[in-house]
Image (cartoon, rainbow, N blue to C red):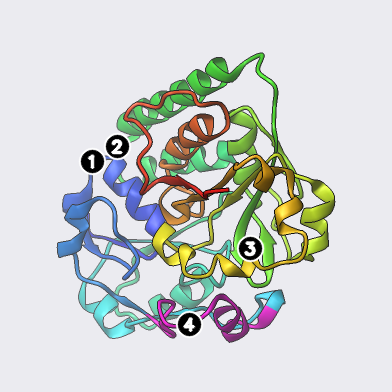
């Protein structure tokens, strides 16, 4: 089977299911595992996020409503030349990846139409269901069932390790300008790790919020995990937060419990690594050891 993944989380799934040898095309953002680096890239960014500010990126995709065009383009000719049997895409966020609608239109122009499978999980349970769905599409249902069982076991282990502990109040931010609370599966990651998620409900597709909402929430812990930004990239815009009125008065800031996390690897993408995200949060919220230990590339604590 020849597979093209137009969603980084789908590439994670293909790797988790042991089918990387069948991957013939990927997005420019598919960066895990390292072996995908040799797979042809069929997408490109419309703007360079490394040189644009968060506000400029937000404005480029339609402002706070995020109803504008995607940040990404797809090389239809190259996609057709790869002759895929299966194209994995999404229709969850027009900003985060090439959408199902655009890929369906592209496929209609191809001589032989591959199957297009759209993945749209909003909760942890749905993320795990995607492992099963992709496993069925790849003809490896037994491997998928084994992987899902392992992921469920790891989540159960996290819950057991934090059971009975005081649950800190947590705000997670997935964008800095405008401020945007992390929704979908992130509130469940927080709850699994022994926290109380504020400002977003499980499965919720969130909207921008004013800074006063964060101040009023008075979080014990503040998680900063901008969509698509590495911790180093996030660090270049932290003044968007630290310069806000009342920053120093937040309980999380006073207690030194502000954390910058690797959003793309463990929180923004609905792939199997969200389970590692829950393990990281258990270490952040309760100092519960993770295996392997949490590294500064995964989570770093801001100094008081």
Callout 1 secondary element: loop
Front residue (pair 9, 168) = 168
Q: Quadrant of residue 116?
A: bottom left
Query: Can you tell which of label 2 and label 4 is closer to the viewer?
Result: 4
Write the start and end of the magenta stretch as one range. 45-63
Q: Which residue is mark 1?
A: 18
Q: Position of residue 64 (x, y in %)?
A: 70, 76
Q: Which residue is mark 4?
A: 52
Q: Earlier in the sequence, mark 4 or mark 3?
A: 4
Callout 3 secondary element: helix
- 296 sits left or right of 161 in the view: left
Q: Quadrant of residue 139?
A: top left
CA separation, marks 1 and 4?
A: 36 Å
Residue in the image at 17% along x and 54% along y: 35
CA separation, marks 1 and 2?
A: 9 Å
Q: Earlier in the sequence, mark 1 or mark 2?
A: 1
Q: Earlier in the sequence, mark 3 or mark 2?
A: 2
Above or below, 40 against 222 in this view is below
User: Do the residues bearing badges 1 and 2 touch, measured as CB atoms within 8 Å?
Assistant: yes
CA separation, marks 3 and 1?
A: 43 Å
Q: Earlier in the sequence, mark 3 or mark 1?
A: 1
Please check the rendered image and state whether residue 289 is part of the magenta-colored stretch, yes or no: no
Query: Can you tell which of label 3 and label 1 is closer to the viewer?
Result: 3
Q: Which residue is mark 3?
A: 242
Callout 2 secondary element: loop
Which quarter of the figure is the N terminus placed in?
bottom left
- 283 sits left or right of 250 in the view: left
Query: Can you tell which of label 4 and label 3 is closer to the viewer?
Result: 3
CA separation, marks 3 and 2?
A: 48 Å
């Amino acid at each position: 089977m020849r597979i093209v993944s137009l969603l980084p989380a789908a590439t994670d799934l293909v790797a988790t299911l042991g089918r990387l040898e069948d991957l013939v095309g990927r997005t420019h953002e598919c960066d895990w595992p390292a072996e995908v680096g040799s797979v042809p890239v069929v997408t490109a960014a419309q703007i360079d996020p490394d040189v644009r500010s968060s506000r400029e990126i937000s404005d480029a995709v339609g402002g706070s409503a995020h109803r504008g065009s995607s940040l990404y383009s797809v090389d239809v000719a190259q996609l057709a030349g790869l002759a895929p049997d299966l194209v994995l895409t999404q229709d969850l966020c027009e900003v985060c990846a090439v959408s199902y609608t655009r890929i369906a239109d592209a496929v209609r122009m191809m001589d032989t139409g591959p199957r297009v499978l759209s993945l749209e999980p909003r909760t942890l349970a749905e993320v795990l269901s995607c492992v099963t769905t992709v496993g069925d599409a790849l003809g490896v249902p037994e491997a998928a069932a084994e992987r899902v069982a392992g992921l469920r076991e790891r989540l159960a282990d996290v819950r057991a390790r934090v059971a009975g502990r005081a649950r800190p109040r947590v705000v997670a931010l997935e964008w800095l300008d405008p401020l945007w609370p992390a929704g979908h599966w992130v509130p469940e990651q927080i709850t699994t790790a022994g926290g109380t998620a504020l400002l977003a409900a499980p499965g919720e597709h969130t909207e921008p919020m004013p800074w006063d909402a964060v101040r009023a929430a008075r979080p014990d812990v503040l998680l900063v995990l901008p969509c698509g930004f590495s911790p180093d990239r996030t660090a270049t815009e932290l003044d968007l937060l630290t310069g806000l009125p009342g920053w120093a008065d937040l309980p999380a800031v006073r207690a030194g419990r502000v954390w910058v996390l690797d959003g793309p690897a463990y929180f923004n993408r609905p792939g199997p690594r969200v389970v590692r995200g829950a393990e990281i949060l258990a270490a952040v919220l309760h100092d519960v050891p993770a295996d392997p230990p949490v590294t500064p590339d995964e989570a770093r604590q801001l100094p008081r």
